[in-house]
Image: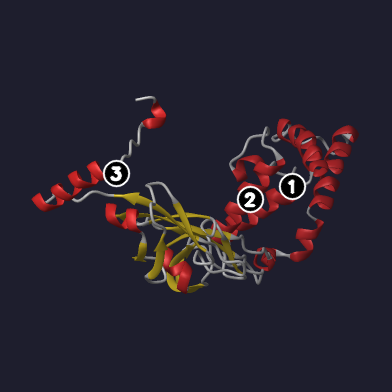
Amino acid sequence: MMEYKDYYQVLGLTKEATQDDIKRVYRKLARKYHPDISKEDNAEEQFKQVGEAYEVLKDPEKRAAYDQLGVDLQAQRDFRPPPSGAAGAAHSADFDDFLANLFAQRGRAGAGAGRVYQENGEDSHFKVSIDLEDAYRGATRSLNLRSFQQERTLNVKIPKGVKQGQHIRLQGQGNPGIGGGTAGDLYLEIAFNPHPLYRVEELDVYLELPLAPWEAALGGSVKVPTPDGAVDMKIPPNSSSGRKLRLKGRGIPAQSPGNFYVTLKVVMPDTLSDKAKALYSELAQEQAFNPRAGMGV
């Protein structure tokens, strides 16, 4: 009588497991016990058992037959029908035929079947944080990647013009395949480090620019910092806080580059000299201006 094998137990699952559960667990265990990479003492035998279980349970029809005939076989595990028992002999023959067909492919492959197992590597994902300035000029990052028991260092070139949230695909740099399978791809998600000056939306960059009261009143040219270096910007006379100015094409460089937006903010000096106070008093007398006139006060 053939010994019953609980393939669900081999995979650490119950009979309620879905086909997705079976596939997910099998992939995990196949990688864990694959003789080419596993350090487990009984890796090859475990790998063969896992592969045998998956061969049956991955196919809904084979699984259904195994569930039915397996229960019958388990119920009579210690029962050997007498040689003349036609019904018992017929049942045993049926199940032996079932198993023979079920494992025909594995039987032909022989004991070394596990070593010819092949699986493509999975894609891997990695988040890379860069400075905004790197998006303007490009950069190189050194990544420490770990796959199974192996570690490796990969130098990655970050092209200029990348934007936050963009994914860069590196073909064949993901998890390695097994048994000669193709390696997966590595996807890098770009994130920007927080910046003390700038705010970024897609390819556009925003800056709040402080102005002295006289700069806002008189206008003129002022130096404006950008991630690509300082530029001269013309401030229109009588500019108020909140006014937005644009430097076209000065955002993150790309085929269609973003813009650089400056929001003006009038800032008072921390202290005023007596002469400055006198000048402000003279201005108040000279200029009839009530900024709250529209508020009814």
Numbered label attached to residue 15: none
Which residue matches tag 2?
26
Q: Where is residue 221 in the image (x, y as percent from the top left)?
A: 36, 66
Whether label 2 touches label 1, CB < 8 Å: yes
Q: Which residue is drawn at 81% across and 39% down?
A: 65
Label 2 sits on a secondary structure element that is helix
| First reached walking from the N terminus: tag 2 or tag 3 | 2
Type of amino acid at the residue the image marks with label 3: Gln
Q: In which quadrant will I find the C terminus? A: top left
Label 1 sits on a secondary structure element that is loop
User: Camera-side residue: 147 or 294?
Assistant: 294
Which residue matches tag 3?
287
Numbered label attached to residue 58: 1
Q: Residue at x 57, y 60 (%)?
A: 167
User: Camera-side residue: 18 or 142?
Assistant: 142
Q: Where is residue 196 in the image (x, y as percent from the top left)?
A: 33, 56
Q: Position of residue 225 (x, y in %)?
A: 36, 65
Position of residue 134 relative to residue 17, above or below, is below
| First reached walking from the N terminus: tag 1 or tag 3 | 1
The mark lying in front, picked from 1 and 3, is 3
Label 3 sits on a secondary structure element that is loop
Residue 33 seen from this side: no
CA distance for labels 1 and 3: 86 Å
Q: Which residue is drawn at 39% across and 24% down?
A: 296
| First reached walking from the N terminus: tag 2 or tag 1 | 2
Position of residue 206 relative to residue 184, above or below, is above
